[in-house]
């Protein structure tokens, strides 16, 4: 049975998964890129952007694993882009250029309908307005025997956590303080929800912490 997995999701020491005031020039919010410094240096990230080189240590291995065995993705609308409210047109196609790094079907949660569209490299974006359970159902079907990766952002992961639908949560904790932004575990008691920490691995620029839902 396919699992719902949050993988390589970066947070600051003070718990933020994105900086404040996301807009076109700040996809991760103001200060947010500091969260992803562990990823930006890896060979995985560089090859996703058509660049050679990059580090091949623990952080890279963690990033590589996070793309393995994934048959579909679920994203929140803000992770997909900075456009808010009804879609003014269909010109926004994500932050990632002509060939997004997903290479699967991707289900974007939103309150605003929009037709699906396909991108180069096998990524198709679908827009789901019927809530988190419907998105999970569609993604699970699309994933077949593989797992569903819940990419984020924060508001989307929180909803799935509150419903105990996330099977695994891999956080890349960066040794930085953001001070403000989107707080991943605000008002969420993971312990009471039945999650436990099963492993932690020190990478070059982040501590990788793995949580699992108890059966
Ligand atoms: N730290 C990391 O590793 C990481 C990873 C991914 C993303 N991020 C960052 O996280 C930030 C985005 O997170 P976020 O918390 O602002 O937003 P988000 O979870 O990406 O998206 C929230 C939006 O998605 C739509 N949505 C969510 N749940 C829905 C539901 N049940 N039904 C219908 N629509 C629903 C709503 O949009 P509408 O009402 O407008 O349709 C909602 O405002 C970005 O800055 C992104 O770069 C960080």
Image: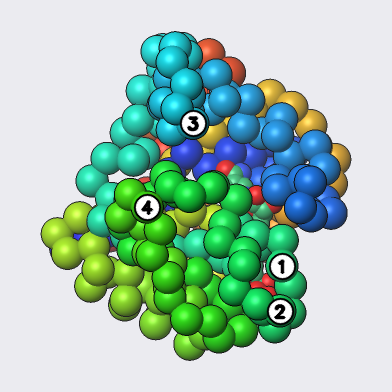
Depth check: give the residue in front, 30 or 177: 30
Task: Give the image quarter of residue 106.
Answer: bottom left
Q: Quadrant of the C terminus?
A: bottom left
x 65%, y 77%: residue: 89
Q: Which mark is first along the chain, 4 or 3? A: 3
The residue labelled by disc 4 is 120
Task: Give the image quarter of residue 210.
Answer: top left
Q: Nearer the viewer, mark 4 or mark 1?
A: 4
Task: Measure how far apart labels 1 and 3 are at the Cα level.
Answer: 23 Å
Q: Is residue 184 above or below residue 187?
A: above
Element assignment for label 3 = loop
Q: Which mark is residue 30?
A: none
Q: Is residue 76 above or below residue 66?
A: below
x 45%, y 27%: residue: 50
Depth check: give the residue in front, 111 or 160: 111
Question: How many discs appear?
Answer: 4
Residue 206 location in percent, x, y? Answer: 56, 24
In the image, taking residue 160 as reference, residue 11 lies left or right, namely right
């Amino acid at each position: 049975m396919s699992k719902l997995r949050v993988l390589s999701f970066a947070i600051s020491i003070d718990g933020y998964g994105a900086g404040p005031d996301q807009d076109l020039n700040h996809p991760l919010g103001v200060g947010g890129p500091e969260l992803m410094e562990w990823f930006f240096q890896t060979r995985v990230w560089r090859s996703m952007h058509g660049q050679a080189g990059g580090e091949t240590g623990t952080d890279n291995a963690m990033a590589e694993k996070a793309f393995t065995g994934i048959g579909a993705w679920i994203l929140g609308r803000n992770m997909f882009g900075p456009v808010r409210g009804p879609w003014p047109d269909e010109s926004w196609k994500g932050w990632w250029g002509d060939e997004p790094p997903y290479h699967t079907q991707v289900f974007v949660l939103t309150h605003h309908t929009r037709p699906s569209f396909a991108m180069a490299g096998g990524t198709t974006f679908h827009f789901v307005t019927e809530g988190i359970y419907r998105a999970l159902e569609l993604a699970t079907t699309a994933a077949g025997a593989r797992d569903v990766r819940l990419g984020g952002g924060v508001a989307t992961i929180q909803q799935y956590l509150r419903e105990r639908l996330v099977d695994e949560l891999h956080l890349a904790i960066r040794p930085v303080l953001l001070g403000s932004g989107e707080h991943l575990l605000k008002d969420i008691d993971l312990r009471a929800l039945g999650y436990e920490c099963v492993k932690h691995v020190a990478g070059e620029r982040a501590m990788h912490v793995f949580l699992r839902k108890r059966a």
